[in-house]
Image: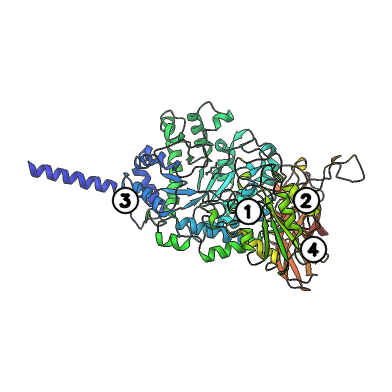
Amino acid sequence: MKKLTYLFLLAQLLLLGSLNAQPYKPSAGIDAKVNALLAKMTLDEKIGQLTLYTTDWGSTGPTIREGYKNDIRSGACGNLFNSHTVGFVRELQRVAVEETRLKIPLLFGFDVIHGYKTIFPIPLGEAACWDLEAIELSAHIAAAEAASAGLNWTFAPMVDVTRDPRWGRVMEGAGEDTWLGCRIAEARVHGFQGKKLGNTDAVLACVKHYAAYGASTAGRDYNTVDMSERFFREYYLPPYKAAVQAGAATVMTSFNDYDGVPATGNKYLLTTILRNEWGFKGFVVTDYTSMNEMVNHGVIADEKEAGELSLNAGVDMDMQGSIYQRFLKQSVKQGKVLQKQIDEAARRVLRLKFELGLFDDPYRFCNEERQNATLLSADHRKAAREVSRKSIVLLKNDKNVLPLQRNQKIALIGPLADNKSELIGNWNGAGNADDCVTVAAGLQGWSLTHVKGCDIEGSDKSGFDAALAAARNADVVVVAVGEKAMMSGEAASRTDITLPGVQEELVLELCKTGKPVVVVLMNGRPLAIPQIAQNATAILETWWLGTETGNAIADVLSGAYNPAGRLPMSFPRSVGQVPVFYNERSTGRPYNPDSKWTSRYIDEVNAPLYPFGFGLSYTTFSYSQPTATVSFAANDASKRYPKSPVTVQVTVTNTGKMAGEEVAQLYVRDLVGSVTRPVRELKGFQKIMLQPGESKTLTFTLKAEDLGFYRRNMTFGTEPGEYDIMVGGSSQDVKTVRVRLEK
Ligand code: GLC
């Protein structure tokens, strides 16, 4: 009898073992493996793969769930975020691959927005460098550091185009322009995902926030978005498409509604456009409880319906809402959603886990030695310094007060002159302020007198006297002012976009001393600083530059690096001008300073303080008259015509005494279209280094789609007629050649 019992037990163990052994041959293809695994999964286990929870280590929203370890153990949660470093990830992954029935590894996501440990400039600052290779390198280093710390998924790039500096999240994007936004989206996706998913210097990218979140009404975060389909497709949609076409593995839905339907339940966005038009194959994740928030939007009655609306719209994964976890099984039973939709969503998640190599080695991103060797490496800091100084925009330099001379006595003033805590900006990953180089530290070795003068906020002016005394005893004043890092980013909209506190007063008092005053701005959004623009001698826009702030700023102040940054977003003269942007339409009464009866204000000019594409250099540049040749008919912008239907040539010369880089920008205007068209749109740029006196002839090639738009019948294409092709050093400083597209 005993023998029979043993044999029976042995058979049970063998059966159990075979049940839980990998249900696929290691040599099988990924799809076969996914299908084989799906076939063994219960409905609960599949729903677990569609569930994403934050751990208790940091959270970016109201944390709903505790006990995430039990959720892993039970198979109810297949993905985590806000958990990183090798030790923490290894333990959580161990629970998943050793204490669950099917041992499916976890995804680990995190907001690695502008660096993981080595912090690079905020994305809006990086966009100012107009250097796609530098931007890709920055994302690649962020991915390598994140992947060395156990992560395999970043919630970036944020590609939301925006014209409204009141919105705090402008700091996360690439500014106001669609075309530049597309190029930068591509560079960031390539940087994050590297040569191949599964490499230990690559992570899944997540293009966000899909879609048009940057158009939040009144610049107030989480607010309604309302626009025509034409404007949506022409202006806000392209960067998401560019990121998807660059291979972004995942997409995150936005908090806002589009055309009355919240993005997280919007089938037009998530299925019609994303999957059917663009062929997106990855998975869609919600933003933080954005599924639950559809109840507040008022489009469904309860959270269970929110889950059904989301799954039917095309959402694969529920971030922190635990709606799929709580209700989806019941929804299947009631026929409100189909089992095959859940299978397809689980398939998309599992496929990426296989592509990351997590089934072959769940701990592939957990290597202590690699983590220690990668984070904050000398090479990464060097790269951060490079990218940071490229991101600095010289807005003013009267009397060539910059670069500073080594023998000058400097009065270093301002609340951000010797401040570490703000420099890594918002969305600063695992960055440590203590790793940062301050402006004062960057200027070590110079003859410096440092006086704070005032705080970033508050009305205390008691520090002014000491600051003014230091200024009077110096040859030049360098004053570092700006916002607090948390005054931009998520849930950080401002109605007043001037310098906070009494900082502007301090700067203006310093200007009254008659000493040259160099203002160093540190901020997460365009600021309205007309008084400073008028009275300061020089102004550097430095955004939040991250770990190497002080070294990058010192490189520019000293002339070791000639600044070449150009604004990715217009700077208004006042918040009353918002939204102010370069690519406006002419209107029926275009601005005429000599006529009251035109599109204007009675108390302000139309032009921004500093326009899109603007930035100075320590040298000067001149442009020849551009020439252009056209080689395609307007109504046949198909593949049958040459790829580059319009070729433009221009010669740029360095007319100054110092080598420097110029960003030659190419803009296009369709003079007469079947719908109103912008007075100019960026369609190309080239960043070139020129020695003093050197000239270079640049050739730009425009493809048909560069001249295309959504015509009156909403089809995309070109139209015959005249176009102005403009080339210059900013959106407002161009030379023009007119071309004609024949029928
Ligand atoms: C936040 C943000 C989103 C971020 C997510 C996870 O609410 O909107 O950008 O990736 O939560 O932290």
Q: For the residues carrying marks 2 and 1, which lies nearer the camera in this image?
A: 2
Q: CA distance from mark 3 to mark 2?
A: 73 Å
- Give the left or right position of residue 380, taking residue 37 as reference: right
Q: Picture coordinates of residue 200 (x, y %)?
A: 45, 60
* Distance between mark 3 and mark 4 Cα atoms: 62 Å
Name the residue carrying label 1: 544
The mark found on residue 22 in the picture is 3
* Colour style of the rendered protein structure: rainbow
Q: Disc 4 residue type?
A: Ala
- Per the image, label 4 sits on a secondary structure element best described as strand
Q: Which mark is residue 509?
A: 2
Q: Nearer the viewer, mark 4 or mark 1?
A: 1
Q: Earlier in the sequence, mark 3 or mark 4?
A: 3
What's the distance in space between the residues labelled 2 and 4, CA to CA? 51 Å
Q: 44 or 471, which lies in front?
A: 471
Q: Which residue is mark 4?
A: 628
Task: State if disc 1 and disc 2 touch (CB < 8 Å).
Answer: no
Crowd rating for badge 4 (residues with CA inside 10 Å; few <14, some 14–19, many 20+) = some
Between circles 3 and 2, the one closer to the viewer is 2
Q: Of circles 2 and 4, which is in front?
A: 2
Mark 1 vs 3, N-terminal side? 3
Q: Element at badge 3?
A: loop
Kind of element beneath mark 1? loop
